[in-house]
């Protein structure tokens, strides 16, 4: 297994340079007494992971997943230079931390020769993964449901909310027995609205790939709680999704209207989540209805109409939220451990404050004897860019030659200085 953290500068993230620096950790098993062979294997694992990360920045999610198997055998050829930062052994496992400088110009050239289109990074609006499960209830369980009193208080019907909706308001018909596997009518309607408004919608295959990794997430996704949080985190790490929209859409057969048309009622519960922080940006519960002479057409119209209603609410909310983030910045928690003395801590704080895109930074904890400090910073660009900028600036501080990444989860980042 290879652990990696993408750390690039803002210039690299915009793909305007010919190089990209990617710190990675390669891992290999020591067989017999061959430590050199294990070191080389760990480095090669690191090269491949660096390539995998860079492909995710140059191509859309589907293209990156397709291109990696074709190029992984060439991973070493894209390495311009490397710097081994640390080696550690645990039993028969060797881990090598290194900074890999990739030849982005050559990688782009090879990708274009293979027919891939290099995407433009740095658009105003984010990449979105849309995950919508559809459910069809042919015979609602009660007469009340058939008459329309289903699952949702009228005060919430058709209204989007800014905070996470209570689980009690989630449509009770979102259960595996009613799930329409493979149906994407609702997702398509919302994806089209997002695309029209300049969001980048990730390919549906990315959703299938993530669900294959987390088998429990095969139905009732919006109800999953901690499992949903893990799904969102993986969407961010593996496919660089910046937003994840999760929804459940149910259509109920409510019989025929007085004119003999097939009547279908539709319900939708949704949450839009900032994938880097896990914060809910928008959520709501909506309902709609549709009529048609054909039962299947009535069902599809019901899915489409409730999705269009959701898109009308969601797109302005997400646009405002993302542009507000771009102007004010997103909150990041930065910790530094292992420094010696007050002067290095102050220098690190000044380095963070001086980074372009940091609109505000304040020290919230300083424990000099314990060699730990904590900083809260508002940053207008992405997490990976902030990490790259911090690496570039911190390495200039005397005594920080061994500065490296210790841990990162969401927007909480821990750096350390080794003795």
Image (cartoon, rainbow, N blue to C red):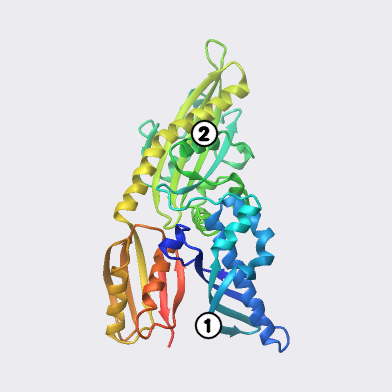
| Between 148 and 43, the one nearer to me in the picture | 43
> Is residue 215 in view?
no
Label 2, on which residue? 189
Q: Position of residue 312 (x, y in %)?
A: 41, 33
Label 1, on which residue? 86
Mark-to-mark CA distance, 2 and 1: 49 Å
**Viewport quadrant of the C terminus:** bottom left
- Choose the circle earlier in sequence order: 2 or 1: 1
Vertical order, 280 against 411 (above or below)? above
Q: Position of residue 113 (x, y in %)?
A: 64, 53
Q: Position of residue 288 (x, y in %)?
A: 46, 27
Vertical order, 183 against 202 (above or below)? above
Count of residue discs: 2
- Left or right placement of residue 320 versus residue 14 in this view: left
| Between 58 and 200, the one nearer to me in the picture | 58
- Left or right placement of residue 271 versus residue 329 in this view: right
Dividing the picture into quadrants, the one containing residue 135 is top right
The residue that appears at 59% across and 85% down in the rendered structure is 89
The local secondary structure at tag 1 comes to: strand
Which label sits in the foreground, 2 or 1?
1
| Between 56 and 173, the one nearer to me in the picture | 56
């Amino acid at each position: 297994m290879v652990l990696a953290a993408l750390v690039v500068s803002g210039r690299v993230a915009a793909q305007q340079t010919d190089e990209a620096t990617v710190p990675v950790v390669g891992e290999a098993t020591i067989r017999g007494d061959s430590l050199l062979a294990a070191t080389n294997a760990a480095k090669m694992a690191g090269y491949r992971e660096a390539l995998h990360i860079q492909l995710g920045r140059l191509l859309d999610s589907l293209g990156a997943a397709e291109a990696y198997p074709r190029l992984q055998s060439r991973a070493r050829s894209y390495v311009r230079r490397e710097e081994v930062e640390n080696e550690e052994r645990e039993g028969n496992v060797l881990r090598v931390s290194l900074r890999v400088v990739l030849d982005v110009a050559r990688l782009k050239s090879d990708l274009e020769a293979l027919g891939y289109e290099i995407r433009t990074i740095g658009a105003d609006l984010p990449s979105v993964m849309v995950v919508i499960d559809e459910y069809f209830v042919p015979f609602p369980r009660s007469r009340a449901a058939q008459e329309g009193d289903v699952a949702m208080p009228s005060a919430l019907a058709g209204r989007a909310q800014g905070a996470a909706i209570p689980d009690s308001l989630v449509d009770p018909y979102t259960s595996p027995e009613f799930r329409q596997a493979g149906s994407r009518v609702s997702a398509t309607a919302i994806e089209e609205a997002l695309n029209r408004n300049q969001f980048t919608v990730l390919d549906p295959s990315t959703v299938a790939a993530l669900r294959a990794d987390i088998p429990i997430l095969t139905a009732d996704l919006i109800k999953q709680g901690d499992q949903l949080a893990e799904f969102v985190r993986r969407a961010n790490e593996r496919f660089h999704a910046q937003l994840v929209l999760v929804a459940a859409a149910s259509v109920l057969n409510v019989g025929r209207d007085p004119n003999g048309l097939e009547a279908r009622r539709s319900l939708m519960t949704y949450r839009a989540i900032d994938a880097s922080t896990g914060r809910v940006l928008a959520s709501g519960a909506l309902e709609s209805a549709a009529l048609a002479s054909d039962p299947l057409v009535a069902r599809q119209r019901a899915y489409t109409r409730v999705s269009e209603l959701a898109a009308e609410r969601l797109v302005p909310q997400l646009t405002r939220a993302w542009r507000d983030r771009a102007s004010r910045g997103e909150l990041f928690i930065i910790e530094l451990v292992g420094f010696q003395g007050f002067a290095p801590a102050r220098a690190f704080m000044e380095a963070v404050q001086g980074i372009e895109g940091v609109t505000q930074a304040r020290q919230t904890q300083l424990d000099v004897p314990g060699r730990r400090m904590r900083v809260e910073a508002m940053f207008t660009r992405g997490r990976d860019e902030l990490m790259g900028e911090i690496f570039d600036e911190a390495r200039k501080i005397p005594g920080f030659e061994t500065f490296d990444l210790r841990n990162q989860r969401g927007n909480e980042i821990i750096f350390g200085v080794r003795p």
